[in-house]
Amino acid sequence: MTKACKLAAGNWKMNGLRADLDEARALASGLGQTSCGVLLCPPATLISAMAEAVAGSRVMVGGQDCAAQVSGAHTGDISAQMLADSGARHVILGHSERRADHGESSALVAEKALAAHQAGLVAIICLGETESERDGGQTLAVVLEQLAGSLPQGATSANTVVAYEPVWAIGTGRTPTLAQIAEVHDSLRANLPDAAISLLYGGSVKPGNAADIFAIANVDGALVGGASLKASDFGAIVAALDAA
Ligand code: PEP
């Protein structure tokens, strides 16, 4: 069986101006001989400039969302092909902030992922339970339903990454126990259409907890929000993944 690739992905969310590209440059120049994939997903306004800033390094650049449509009358939306044309290699889809703030369903996420694949992008598909769903013992049912609904036909380890991000752990400083992360990742792995698809954990990953999380068997990396904004923090997370 092919082993899943390790990936440290940073989600800058709606943060970052051109001056902040210095953090991307610092990350790129500080990376050692890492064997894992390193990805930064800045706001769409910075994709092109960031791709130029880190050109020649191991840092890849991605988007945070794309339209399901290829082109046309969709004011304000950005197609997958446009992201690729700007220098993106990946796109985050179905982040809980988009599912909550923009009412995105798993069916829409699957349509967007298909558009991403057709444009040659790797889709990073996010899943995760709310706190009340966890308290109600529904975690596995919720994430497996999201997995089944959000992965498009043709999803393979070459074009898809899955990120488990408990909604209550995002930006809160709280994380599940290592056993809780392991339980969800084991279950996701068993239900993937291609067992070599990389499985990332996301939710308050920091330099201080990264090594413990990366030691979990079916965790292949992390999707990191706040701690990806500073090269020193994200670089330490990349180093922990490399050492795992
Ligand atoms: C995220 O936004 O995907 C995330 C995991 O954020 P944070 O690391 O800040 O919790």
Image: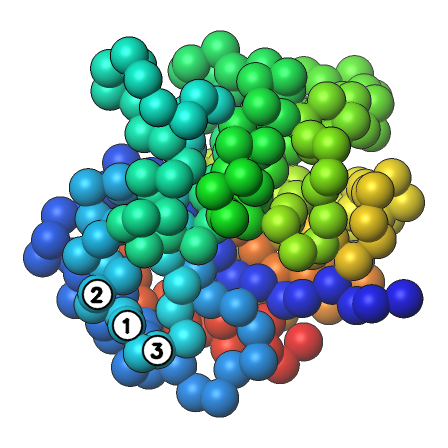
Extreme residue toward the left, this view: 19
Provide residue 132's location: percent of width, then percent of height. 67, 16
- Disc 1: CA contacts within 10 A as few (<14), some (14-19) or many (>=20): some
Provide residue 215's location: percent of width, then percent of height. 73, 68
Colour mapping: rainbow
Q: Which residue is mark 1?
A: 55
Which SS class for mark 2?
helix
The numbered dot on residue 57 is: 3
Provide residue 91's location: percent of width, then percent of height. 46, 43
Give me the C-alpha separation between circle 3 and circle 2: 10 Å
- Disc 3: CA contacts within 10 A as few (<14), some (14-19) or many (>=20): some
Extreme residue toward the bottom, this view: 33
Determine whether, in the image, residue 14 is placed left or right of residue 187: left
Q: Is residue 133 above or below residue 33?
A: above
Q: Is residue 143 visible?
A: no
Q: Nearer the viewer, residue 47 or 239?
A: 47
Q: Residue at x 40, y 63 (%)?
A: 60
Q: Is residue 219 visible?
A: yes
Q: Quadrant of the N terminus?
A: bottom right
Mark nearer the N terminus (3 vs 2) = 2
Q: Which residue is mark 2?
A: 52
User: Answer yes or no: do the residues labelled 1 and 3 have beta carbons within 8 Å?
Assistant: yes
User: Answer yes or no: do the residues labelled 2 and 1 have beta carbons within 8 Å?
Assistant: yes
